Image (spheres, rainbow, N blue to C red):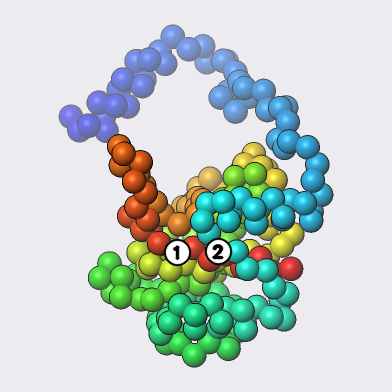
Amino acid sequence: MSSRERVLGRVRRALADVPQDDTPYEQAVRRDYAVAHGRLGAEGTVALLAENLADYRAVVHRCSADDLAATIAGMLAARGARTVLVPPGLAPEWLAAADVERVPDRAGSTPHELDRVDSVVTACAVAVAETGTIVLDGSPDQGRRRITLVPDHHICVVRVPDQVVSSVPQALGRLDPARPLTWISGPSATSDIELDRVEGVHGPRTLEVVLVG
């Protein structure tokens, strides 16, 4: 008997006395609670997102759609990036002004190959203002999860106000739970028992977020 069969067997035994007409799980818990705290409006919500992103040590930039290519090019130049990992669905014009080698997101790329890339540029699925969180869902303009975990520098573009919500419950309402969701709150970091912070342990050391209005 496999471990899977043992686990499923225990689940069946635990549910043996549950009536067939019992309330389905989706209806068992009331979902009429408040999904946001207060009403900031679109401008206030975006401002809160920028504040909380910065609080998590992300670098925040704001620009218009017309200035996005120049903004990204300037960020890559300031970083000294020569190679940029590009998801297959990323808008080509975003990197039109950047003098870099574009590395495609390939299924066969090894961790060592990804680690040699200077930067990665992606879009996002949604951004949560209250927590300063960016969520990726593996869509074509975001690529596979690993391309945003291995390179040391991640540039993430957020369209405001369309992709910004106030709270986590609002974000969950926009996301497909069957997709590979990556929740990012600032650059990767951890602390030891003495609270010494170390960045870049299981993700990029530097997260730059561009709020495009």
In the displayed structure, 45 sits above or below 78; it is: above
Asked if residue 174 lies left or right of residue 207, the reply is: right
- Residue 120 appears anywhere in the view: yes
The quarter of the displayed image where residue 65 is located: bottom right
The residue singled out by tag 2 in the image is 59
The kind of secondary structure element at disc 2 is strand
Q: Residue 130: which quarter of the image?
A: top right
Whether residue 157 is situated above or below residue 163 in the rendered picture: below
Residue furthest to the top in view is: 17
Crowd rating for badge 2 (residues with CA inside 10 Å; few <14, some 14–19, many 20+): some
Name the spot of residue 18 as percent of width and height, x first. 48, 12
Say what amino acid the circle numbered 2 marks: Val
Determine the residue positioned at 79% across, 56% down. 43
Q: Position of residue 135 (x, y in %)?
A: 55, 54
Residue receiving disc 1 = 206
Position of residue 185 measured from the top left corner of the image (x, y, whole percent): 51, 51
Q: Residue 213 or 1: which is nearer the viewer?
A: 213
The answer to which of 201 and 126 lies nearer the viewer is: 201
